[in-house]
Amino acid sequence: MELATYIRERRQEKELLIMAHVVCGYPSFEENMQALEIMEQAGVDLVELQFPFSEPSADGPIFVRANEESLKSGTTIDQCFDFMRAVTSRFTFKVLMMGYYNTVFKMGEKDFLERLSAAGGVAFILPDLPIAESVMLRKTALSRGIDPIIFMTPTSSEKRLSELGAASSGMVYVVARKGVTGTKSNIDAEVVALLQRCRMHTDVPLGLGFGISNRDDLQVLRGTADVAIIGTAALKTWQNAGPFGLRDFFHALS
Amino acid sequence: MDIFDFSSGREGYYGQYGGVFLPEVLHNTIEELLHCFRECKEDPDFWREYVRLLQNYSGRPTPVTHLPNLSSHLGGAQIYVKRDDLNHTGSHKINNVMGQGLLCQRLGKKKVIAETGAGQHGYATATMAARFGFDCKIYMGAVDVARQRPNVFWMENLGAEVIAVQDGQKTLKDAINECMRDWVLNMTDTHYVLGTACGPHPFPEMVSWFQSIIGIEAREQILALVGKLPDRIYACVGGGSNAIGIFQGFLNDENVELVGCEAGGLGVGSNMHAARLAYNDASVGVAQGYKTYFLQNQQGNMLETHSIAAGLDYIGINPIFSYLWEQDKVRFEAATDLEVKEALRLIMRMEGLIPALETTHAFASAIKEAPTMAADQIILINQSGRGDKDIFMIADALDDQQWKSFIKDKATQYRLEEN
C-alpha cells in the first residue's frame, strides 16, 4: 500500500497529482533523463517507465513508433532496469513499470518482481494482463510491497467494477474512453460520472488516463480524480518542441 | 478426447496454452462473444444452417480425390487429398468466415473487421460481408498489400476498405495488432472476424469448430472410398485453422497419425522461417491475446519470420497445437521454400492440381514420407487452398521468364495508355 499512502499524502497539499510517461530508450536514455529532469522540476508526482515491446497492441501510433524505435536501437530489459534504478535514486517522484505481460512472463514473475523492487519501482501496469490471469503475480507482488495497477473502463459493468475493485491496490487506472492511447478525449461530465462509478467500487486513489492534454482537462478532474495521467501529449510535445517545449507544457498544466 | 471440454481445467486453456490476454476495455465484448458462441454451439439449428449455407454458397461438401499418378510415382502409400481448394474464394477460409458471419448476425453487429496476411482471409471476409450486408474493413500489412495486389483488388471490388498497416514488420502480426486497436474502439457495433485458430479464447475454439466441417466430411468420405481410415494426415500450419479442421475428424483414432507442416523458409538455423514447433527456435510466450509458442527472442520480443507462403508467415501457433504436440498427438514437420517449389511443380505435372503455396507445404512433407510407406497404406492431405489465383506469387516462386516478360509488356502498355 506504499503507493496509495504516497498519493494520499501528496494529495494533502495538491488537489490533483500528475503521472507522466516515458518510453525507455526513446528517443534515447539520455533524452529520457532530460525529460524526467523537466518533469521533476515541474512537480510531477509519478512516472511510468514503459519497457518497450514488439507488439504494443494497446498503444496508439505515437507510442507504437516509440516502442519500435527503442527496440531498433537495441534497448534491453537490463538497460531498462538500470535506468529505473538511476531514476529512482535521483528523483523524488515515484516510479511505476509499464509494459506488456510477455516481458514479465519471459523473465519469470518472481525475477521480475525482484528486479523491479531492486530498481526502486513501486508498482507495475500491464494493460494486456486481465485479473483472471494475474492472480499469482498480484499476490506475490503485494507480499513484496509492490502494487499491481488495475484498470477500470467505460465498458466495465457494475459487476465487473466490483471484481476489479476487489483486486485493486495502490491506484486504479481509469481509462477515460474506449480505444488506444494517444487520441484526444473529451474530459467532460461523462468522465466525471465514470470516476464516480469507479469510486463506488474501490478505496484506493483513482488515476485518469487516455487523451488528457491540457489545463482544462485537469480542471474538470479536480475533486473527482486523484491523479491525472499524461502520456502521449507530453511525448508529442517533446517530439515537436524539444526540452523547452516540454517545460512549457508542464508549466501550463500547473 | 474432447479438447474443448474445460470442465476439469480452466476455460479456454489447452494444457498451459490459450487463455485471454486482452485489455480490460474488451472484457465485456469477449464475454458477450463467448456467451453468443456457446449458444450457437449448443444449438443444432445453428450448425444445420451453417452447413446449408456452405453447401449452397461455397460448394460443400468438397470431394476427396485419389492421386494415382503421384502415388505410383513415389512408389509408397496411396495419396488422397481433401479438396477444400474447391470452395468459393479458393480456400478453407470461407468456412470460418461464413460461420462468424452467422454469429455476427446473432450478435446484432453490422460491421466486421479482419486481419489478413496473404489476403485469403481478407478476401473471404469481404465476400462474406458483401453477402451478409456488413460494413467491412480489412487490415493488411503494407508489405503484404504490395505483394498481394490481386487479393487487394478483389477485396476492394467486393466493397471492403483495405487498410495498409505501416507498423512493425508490416505483415500479418502487425495487421492483428491493428485489428485489436480498431476493436478496442469500435467493439460496440463491430465484430472481429479473426482468421485463424489463434488469439484469445473463444477464437481458437470457435474457428476450430467452424473448420471441423472439413474433418467431419473427410472421415466419412475416405471411409466410403477406401473402406478404412488413413494412416497419416498432412496439413499445413500457419495459424493452424485448416489443420485443426481436418484433424478433429480423427483425433480419437489411435492409428491415424496427424502431421502438421510448418514453413521451413530457408531451413534450420537460418532464422528465416516460421517453424514454431518443427524447429527449436520458438518458446512459450504471451502475445496477441493468447499464450502459445512464439518465435521470439530472450527478451520476449517477436522475431522476424519468413516463408515463401505469406499465409504461413506468422510468429505464433494455434494454442491447441502447442498442447497436442506436447501430448504427442500431432507430429510437426517443416518444408523449406525450395522443397515447396519442387513439390508444386511435381503435383501440377502429375495430377493437374494447383495447390496454394501454403498447402504445398503439406504436400512436400507427404512427398518426403510416402516412399517409406507400404502400398496399402493411406495418406490424406488437406488441400486447403488453390494456387491458380496466386499466379503472381507462384510465377515469382517458379521464376517464370515468360510470365515476367508478359508483365513487362503489360506495364509498357499501361504507360503508353497514360501518355
Image (cartoon, coloured by chain):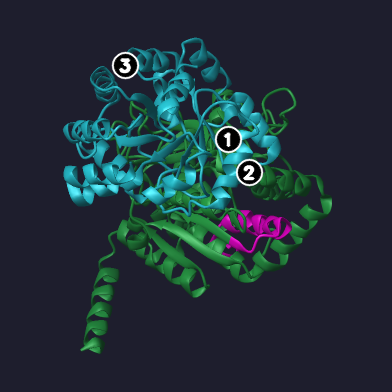
Chain colours: A cyan, B green
- Which residue is located at x 57 percent, y 24 percent? B16
Q: Is residue B3 visible?
A: yes
Q: Are marks 3 and 2 in contact (CB under 8 Å)?
A: no
Mark drawn on residue A119: 3
User: Pointer 3 indicates a residue of which chain?
Assistant: A
Q: Residue furthest front?
A: A13
User: Pointer 2 indicates a residue of which chain?
Assistant: B
Tell me which amino acid carries mark 1: Val
Magenta residues? B86-111
Q: Position of residue B265 (x, y in %)?
A: 34, 42
Taking depth in this image into account, of A67 and B169 the one nearest to the observer is A67
Mark drawn on residue B20: 1
In what element is the residue under mark 1? loop
Tell me which amino acid carries mark 2: Ile
Report the magenta stretch's main SS: helix
Q: Quadrant of residue A13?
A: top left
Relative to residue B169, is residue B289 depicted above or below?
above
**Mark pair 1, 3: CA separation:** 30 Å
Tell me which amino acid carries mark 3: Ala
Circle 2 Cα neighbour tier, 10 Å, few/some/many (<14 / 14–19 / ≥20): some
Q: Are marks 3 and 2 on the same chain?
A: no
Q: Which residue position holds label 2?
A: B30
* Number of the front mark, 3 or 2: 3
Q: Are marks 2 and 1 in contact (CB under 8 Å)?
A: yes
- Which residue is located at x 34 percent, y 61 percent? B147
Is B73 within the magenta? no
Circle 1 Cα neighbour tier, 10 Å, few/some/many (<14 / 14–19 / ≥20): many
**Mark pair 3, 2: CA separation:** 36 Å
- Which residue is located at x 50 percent, y 23 percent? A170
Circle 3 Cα neighbour tier, 10 Å, few/some/many (<14 / 14–19 / ≥20): many
